[in-house]
Image (tube, grey):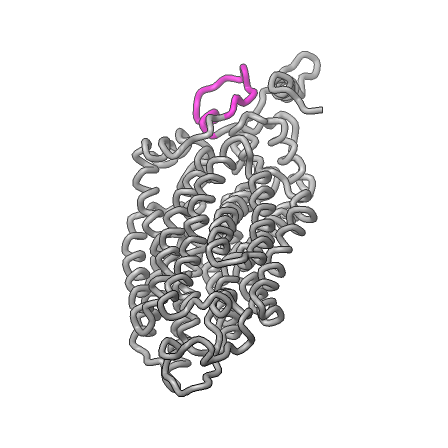
Amino acid sequence: MKQSKLERTSTEMATALSIETSGRGNGVQSPVKKMCMDDMLHHYCGEFGRWHLKHFVLTNLSWVLVGFHIMVMIFADHEPHLTFHAAAKSICELKPGSWEWVGGRHATTVSEWGLVCGDKYKVGLVRALFFVGWMIGGAVFGHLSDSFLGRKRSLGVANALNAVFGCLTALSPNYWIYVVLRFLTGFSTGAVALCAYVLASEPIGSKKRGAMGMCTFYFFSGGIALLSGIAYIFQTWRYLYIASSAPSFLYTILVLPFISESPRWYLIHGRVTEAMNVMSTIASTNGKHLPDGILLALDEEINSDTTNEGLESKGARAGSIFDVVYSPVTRVRLLLVMVLTFLCDLSYYGISLNVVNLKNNLYLNVLVNAVGEMPAFAITAVLLGKFGRKPLMVGTMWFSGLFCLMGSLMRSVGVWKVVRMLCGVLGVSGMAGTYNLLYIYTSELFPTVVRNTALGCTTQAASMGAMVAPFVVVLGGWLPFAVFAACGIMGGVLALFLPETSNQPLPDTFRGLEAGHAS
């Protein structure tokens, strides 16, 4: 039976009272010790143990599916090779029927709906509108997951929508229905990425959060690499959409029930019992012991002079974008990270989509790019603790910018074609490291009450960059690499203005953030 709000509040108060009075033997009162989550993880539960590993892997499996839903467009919307029945330099010079598509008319959306010549812009349009959906979905679910829906339920809803929209895409009768369904898939995919990252990272201790956050995108790159194999097997776009969307059903049904809600979300909503239950489970699974007389509390409660009276947490009001903009500390941070995510996503997705201009084997190019990203995650994870967030972000953006600049100077002929491909791999590798760092950095720059809201805003900025990327790719020649080089160099300069957050406690409220900022 579902508890009423009054019953739940009474339970919270009773729990706090029982904790407060625990240890009262022979009339001796044992005071309750209030602790923030980072301290409780560090002293009693473990910063990263068996519980964390299970939670981290199961939650981040959804990033494999994010890779499927984003990068499927490379294979579904690419222009196949042609067999000409007459001499011509371009398909646009011939009448319909003067050529045949290798793989058949229904191999891709381009061949089925004739998205060539004057209609070539439609390929960039559908890709751009996918990221418009991503932008809106990130904003909507950013608020929902911070407020009443929570991290876990938001992740479940978004994955279910992904499966439905992805499978319906395979049934698209025409281009414009296809566009609508790709927009809707973008809406739910942006929500999955946002909720999965926050849900996986929030229960991890401050000393391990950065390194484990870098491991998140192994799942994303692994998904892209796996997709190249799936696309090689299912070389008809409709079957490919079903094959890449069905796993989202399986994840929602088979994996999600074994994932816990974030204890931080419970805490900011005043649900201390649920939060303490999760922390107790974390401790026992990790082979630790959470002693009696310890109460989880918000950082603002600990920083205040609150007495032991009324120790039950009243929770914190879920914030909004207005709170982020109102605070002078978070306002500047939000502006900087939004610009950085715009530049990062423009480069990352642009370089990834630019494989169609490299004139090599498409399946091999996507696989090499995906595998090429993985060393960047390992290197940045190792260097993260030594150099911190800011210097590493500057370095990865400038690294990507340098190789993209070199790529813009290479010709697409002979051996230079291979060198240009390697420049692209190194460029996307550096920007992949930045992409990963930005999620870690952003989650640490904002308090729990608005963390998903802030990430939702940066997701919108990132989506704008990703929306521009397909149109940059359509330019062809040396221009795409030149644009991506400029993004990397400019982003590295802007990153210099962000504060360092390495090994700092993860703030729950604005008061906690401002107290840490002042110190």
Quarter holding the C terminus is: top left
Left or right relative to 22: residue 380: left
Q: How many marks?
A: 0
Q: Nearer the viewer, residue 187 or 365?
A: 187
Residue at 35%, 67% in the rendered image: 118
Left or right relative to 152: residue 406: left
Q: Is residue 435 above or below residue 27?
A: below
Residue 64 in view in this figure: no
Residue 291, x across and y down, in percent: 65, 31
Residue 200 in view in this figure: yes
Residue 316, x across and y down, in percent: 48, 26
Most extreme residue toward the top, as rendered? 27
Left or right relative to 76: residue 123: left
| Residue 492 location, quadrant | bottom left
Q: Say whether residue 138 is magenta.
A: no
Residue 161, x across and y down, in percent: 57, 46
Q: Nearer the viewer, residue 514 or 485?
A: 485
Q: Is residue 244 above or below residue 150?
A: below
Quarter holding the N terminus is: top right
Q: Nearer the viewer, residue 73 or 99?
A: 99
| Residue 426 location, quadrant | bottom left
Q: Say whether residue 303 is magenta.
A: yes
Tell me the chief SS of the magenta region.
loop
Q: Is residue 101 above or below residue 191?
A: below
Instruction: Please provide the residue range marked out in magenta.
Output: 299-315
Residue 287, x across and y down, in percent: 69, 43
Q: Nearer the viewer, residue 302 or 28?
A: 302
